[in-house]
Amino acid sequence: MDQTPNIYEQERRQKLTKLREAGIDPFGQAESGILPLADLKAQYQTQMGHDGGPVVKGSGRIILKRDMGKLSFLTLRDDSGDLQVALDKKRLDERGWTIRGLLDLGDLIVVEGPLGTTNKGETTIWASRIEMASKALLPPPAKWEGMSDVELRYRHRYVDLWTNPQVMELAKLRIRIIDQIRQYMRDRGFLEVETPMMQVIHGGAAARPFVTHHNALDMNLFLRIAPELFLKRLLVGGFTKVFEINRNFRNEGISPRHNPEFTMLEAYEAFGSWETMANLVEGMICQLAENLFGGLKIEHKNADGEVVRTINLQRPWRRVRMTDLVEERTGWKFDQQPISDQQKAAIRESNPGKDLKLHGSPAEQLVEVYEKLIEPTLIDPCYVTHVPSVIIPLARKNRQDDYFADVYELAINGQEISPGYSELNDPDVQAANFAHQVGDKEEQQKTDDDFLNALRHGMPPAGGMGLGIDRLIMMLTGADSIRDVILFPLMKPHA
RNA sequence: GAGCGCGUAGCUCAGUUGGCAGAGCAUGUGACUUUUAAUCACAGGGUCCUGGGUUCGAGUCCCAGCGCGCUCACCA
């Protein structure tokens, strides 16, 4: 950043000096009795008249200012909303009037006075006292357009939050959603636990990890890619229903659907199955939609307010085998054999622009076709079941056909939002699965001997599930980018 | 990691064929005691992302780099 203050900062610094010369601390002090602006606004009733309301104290940022000689109107904003303040020369003492003359857009102030209204009916605090809470040395963005450059918005979220009210609303909505998820899980007897984020062996998913270093032990540690193996250790330890909501870290590309750190719910239930977990997730998301929006239809709108997508969460949600879905959409009847050249050519031809490799085992080919061609089109919730078991080394095989695992992958809004397994608890099968994996060597799961040791002590049959919280919030709110639902997405520093 | 697009005042954006750097908001000064994006008058404000090149002359054309966005790859 430029170290020499520009003209705007210089002007504000001059006001800083003038405030101090008048014996006023531009950066304020502790105050008691400040209430949210929205609460104050709600206290006003018509019979209170012009200025007959209770004396109230509020604070906020000056987002609009209208000066008229001996009277000023300010619009203050805090995290509850906006409220108008009137600064009337007759009501303020000399100190207060001095402050009025040195106010700028963006300043944080405290005001106290009777609640009332103006001729035009705007609820207003008629300030009898004003204090500086913090002088803003930098100017806010244009009052009407706000801050719209996405790079600036992400880098300066601290400005984005108060200039764009919908950003604050979305941040608060995220908080409510996570709150309600916790409540939903607790209501069903799940205990929230915490497991290591720094791990000696990273497991529980197929992904490249971040590496860090412990100085005193002189050893590398990995930021977790999933909490799965530790949550299962807790089942071995005797917990029967546990969940964790926290960050996972994956050293992969960044996109509108991927942030290097993302928030995940994982839950495990002794004697559950992929089906009990599917029911758990289905109930949770429907309850969230009902509580937040009063219905099961989610509408995504574009900038012009037009509905671009409707997601119907009406139960029951579709459950379909991955092979059936692939056949339905592409005509490829999967027979556990490599895809024929003819079929390969047909799929490529009808899907131009998609880089279909169709290398590797038949299972990998099936999953590639599903993930690249079908998953992005699944807008309404869909549980895709019977995924080839070689892809999922931590899940149980299906009893009828052990080529497939007893799992679901839940897609909504064109994204995988939740996987659920009937968890594998046979230590010998687990050891064999670690040893015989497909796919990229760097992303393969490492054999975790301590985890295998835990399984040898006995883990109950269990259902397990994960839920990508950021993507869930994207689905519920219609956000197009994961960066819009994460307050501080990762950004490269400027050169 | 690859392709495409973008980067101009504090913010939001124009900028013609390569010919003095523009607007709105914001800011400063003045007027104004009921405004609602207050209004009116005047004024100030620029590393045109960075570094090279072509040219008499580059915001504009060329090359390289940086950052951001989108698509693809990877993945949840």
Image (cartoon, coloured by chain):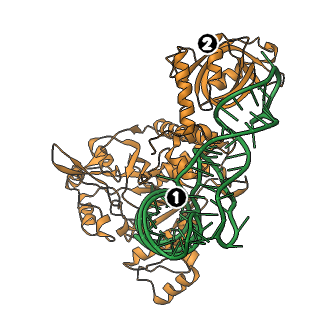
Chain letter for the part of the structure drawn in orange: A
- State the image coordinates of residue A300 (x, y, percent, origin top left): 66, 54
Q: Nearer the viewer, residue A416 or A251?
A: A251
Q: Residue at x 63, y 39 (%)?
A: A165
- State the image coordinates of residue B63 (x, y, percent, origin top left): 46, 74
Decide if residue A154 is in sight here. yes
Q: Nearer the viewer, residue A72 or B28?
A: B28
- State the image coordinates of residue A316 (x, y, percent, origin top left): 60, 55
Q: Quadrant of residue A176?
A: top right
Q: Residue at x 56, y 38 (%)?
A: A7
Q: Residues within 10 Å of mark 2 (few under 14, many from 20)?
A: some
Q: Quadrant of residue A430?
A: bottom left
Q: Residue at x 25, y 61 (%)?
A: A446
Q: Say what secondary structure mark 2 lies in.
A: helix
Q: Hey, what amino acid is under mark 2? A: Arg
Which chain does the residue under circle 1 lie in? Answer: A
Decide if residue A134 is in sight here. no
Q: Is residue A56 left or right of residue A20?
A: right
Which chain does the residue under circle 2 lie in? Answer: A
Q: Which mark is residue A95?
A: 2
Q: Is residue A103 left or right of residue A88?
A: left
Residue farthest bottom in this picture: A342
Query: Dot 1 corresponds to which residue?
Result: A256
Q: Is residue A467 left or right of residue A312?
A: left
Q: Nearer the viewer, residue A82 or A492?
A: A492
Chain letter for the part of the structure drawn in green: B
